Image (cartoon, rainbow, N blue to C red):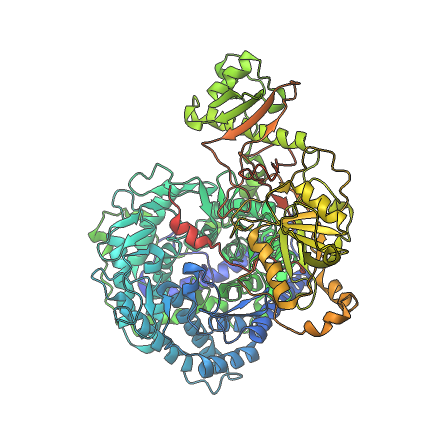
Amino acid sequence: MSGAAGCQGGGGGGGGGERGPRWRRPWKLLALGLLSASSVLAAAPGAGAMSKEEKRRLGNQVLEMFDHAYSNYMEHAYPADELMPLTCRGRVRGQEPSRGDVDDALGKFSLTLIDTLDTLVVLNKTKEFEEAVKKVIKDVNLDNDIVVSVFETNIRVLGGLLGGHSVAIMLKEKGDFMQWYNGELLHMAKELGYKLLPAFNTTSGLPYPRVNLKFGVRHPEARTGTETDTCTACAGTLILEFAALSRFTGTSIFEEYARKALDFIWEKRQRSSNLVGVTINIHTGDWVRKDSGVGAGIDSYYEYLLKAYVLLGDDSFLERFNTHYDAIMRYISQPPLLLDVHIHKPMLNARTWMDSLLAFFPGLQVLKGDIRPAIETHEMLYQVIKKHNFLPEAFTTDFRVHWAQHPLRPEFAESTYFLYKATGDPYYLEVGKTLIENLNKYARVPCGFAAMKDVRTGSHEDRMDSFFLAEMFKYLYLLFADKEDMIFDIEDYIFTTEAHLLPLWLSTTNQTISKKNTTTEYTELDDSNFDWTCPNTQILFPNDPMFAQSIREPLKNVVDKSCPRGISRVEESLGSGPKPPLRARDFMASNPEHLEILKKMGVSLIHLKDGRVQLVQHAVQAASSLDAEDGLRFMQEMIELSSQQQKEQQLPPRAVQIVSHPFFGRVVLTAGPAQFGMDLSKHKAGTRGFVATIKPYNGCSEITNPEAVKEKIALMQRGQCMFAEKARNIQKAGAIGGIVIDDNEGSSSDTAPLFQMAGDGKNTDDITIPMLFLFNKEGNIILDAIQEYEAVEVLLSDKAKDRDLEMENMDQKLPESDSNKQNSEEAISASQDVGAVSEEPEDDSDVTDPGSFPPADADSDSVSISNQDSYIPGSDEAGASEPACTQGDHQPQEQKTETESDSKVNWDSKVQPMESILADWNEDIEAFEMMEKDEL
């Protein structure tokens, strides 16, 4: 999602003036006005202006980062659509495990190269651009028998071709480059446009969400055309590219189809609220999902209404945008939050979390000219980023992680750039500097930049989307670039949602579409809501260098203060006045007052036959929703207390790293720790050795193949006896370490909460070797490697080691008898998982499975905890939320024994990322897919 180009400051707000196409020069003048305002604010005393040398250094750093990503794509992936940066190869659709809808962006048309074309020119890489254009013309085939997303293909491929054509003709006019160019990219764009048109063959004019590039929609071999629904943004984000294609070529049909789709959406808006839903039936126009916001599913529909007015000069688009914008600010905007609401009941929130795609909205507000709320929302988002290093794919209203992924989205960088253009506040340069540092520190890998699978642990996905090159580096470079750094005037262009450049002169070219203003046919509009010229910069930006800072300041600690320690509602209801809530450490099962408090919180106390006391929470039985929250917090404290009493120190996850040839440390598996044996956190070198499968495989009796296990790391299967018993048996056989593999077929750290292996209730000081636990899927990675390479060496450690160091010593470690067998250059396949490795626990996850512990004030009673109504998933679960705020530094981690197979441990961790950690290679968690499936 990209914001406006050029001036990025107007469209609404202040003054009257000319309508229609004659806006272009005032728009250009606004750009100069913003730059003027920037210079004033940046130079103001106390503004903390960044030196020109520092800006240039950061701009050069952005160029180096782009080169790292682009060169690795061209070397390891081209002509594939995208680079897989962990395995250093191209992602070819059909040759990798399906990722669901996200793969619909891939069409075997060298997506990343096309998406990056105009970025090369913005970054002054004109020679590389010329070479890239020649490759696209020579190599790219648009007639593939493949089903693609109409939306993604439009914004990335059609937009990329048009953006490339726009800058190609600009360079040709300048006379230094592209003198041979004869509109080849435009011809390809027109060909692609015709291939997308069959999707519009519906009675409503809304396009099908997918189309077959070779066979269209309704052809027997098309394998699509049965869909009934599409998202509002999918149908409403076509007008810029389709209109530009019509204006460039003189063929009006493209603009006509895009306008018809926009007209239909506008007609189907909810009339009383003037909001639109997320998903609409393409045949009937009925709203399928009736929640409305500014994030995923709707975002770029609003963006394109305003930008269509900017590019095409059609008043109706501005009127529609302003009508929607008024509704957004009335219902959705709850500063600094932007929360989805129901279109029929807009005063009712539809969810308690926000998705990361709304980060584009402050940039759009800059284009609108509404600066104050843009600053507020941007600052809130920045505080979330400072907490998690990246913006989680979704986060709650109290700023906890809801969906932990981050596919290197550029929307926040986009808004940062526009706010700097609008205010000139050097604060936004520092924000950009933070983004650069985080990308290099946490996302950079040897073959590019890898998406974050979990912002809390720092684990990676083998994914580098094309929009990362198309947008992120473009906005970051423009943020630090001065006008003299550019080879053309960026103010002459508007950005599409994918940050592709379309020239503003298209507004007066090939105008073949009648501009009937249909807006007022549907609603009575207040003329005072509409402004026809760019806003006065003196109104937008007062002569106060502290203007933006004064808006940001109250939000500086909004994330940290989002979990205030309140007064217990139940204690207030008992008439005891304001006093601290009941804490788990103070709870006494024999105290009647405590039992009454538990009852109001929906917590039941059950006396078990063995003398233990079980606590169970049913949120629906609480006296109120606030009391239910207190009950949940109490249960979480109980779980934490239980864990602390069972084990004095929380154990973070460990790492199993395959270091032998051909892996060389690139495969890192997340492993569960043991509460006995060697403490790997105190042995930084870890335990390194070749693996061997024991007999019997369950390790529950004396090992019958000790000669194969001696001085090796033993592999065994979970089940049939205690973990400690397995450890003693392999230690007796001479093993230097052990790995227990889950016997539950298909289990994986991706989908199941990890756990630590508990002892057997006896003294385990006799166990001195390290023991780690792997789920079935991760364990099979090692077993498969043994089958293929026989000699497989692993490192058991508290965190992954630098693989370069491993490679230096590899030849010394490999047995000579096996050296001839280690000749493959292929790493493990992409279907295999690599887990995140963490260093210390973080207060991010709670467990509500049963466990037992003695209360702090009791000697005999034990308490078992169960929360049946409010389950809190662990950090490794797809789409998991972080728990409610807690006071401690560590979260509970449940004990797991072989005899308690139903209980699992949830724990979260804080990672110490480094370039050598190659995390998850299996992309089975996709944010957009979850957004579509999410139900209230």
Who is closer to the viewer here, 420 or 527? Answer: 420
Query: Residue at 30% of width from left, 65% of height from top?
Result: 224
**Residue 103, horizontal then vertical, whole percent:** 43, 63
Point out the image quarter for the N terminus. bottom left
How many discs appear? 0
Quadrant of the snapshot with the C terminus = top left
Image quarter of residue 650: top right
**Taking 642 as reference, is 286 above or below it?**
below
In front of the other: 70 or 117: 70
Residue at point 75% right, 63% down?
Answer: 805
The answer to whether residue 281 is above or below residue 622 is: below
- The residue positioned 33% from the left and 55% from the top of the image is 232
* Position in image of residue 494 (x %, y %): 43, 65
- Residue drawn at 29 percent across, 53 percent down: 280
Q: Residue 809 sits in which quadrant? A: bottom right
Which quadrant of the view contains residue 763? top right
Asked if residue 687 shows in the view, the reply is: yes
Question: Residue reaching furthest bottom?
Answer: 180
Q: Is residue 665 above or below residue 539?
A: below
Residue 493 lies, in percent from the top left, at 44, 68
Residue 254 is situated, as x and y percent measured from the top left of the image, at 29, 70
**Residue 25 in sight:** no
In the displayed structure image, the side of residue 201 where residue 853 appears, left or right:
right
List the single residue furthest toward the right: 812
Q: Is residue 387 left or right of residue 649?
A: left
Q: Between residues 614 and 333, which one lies in front from this camera angle?
A: 614
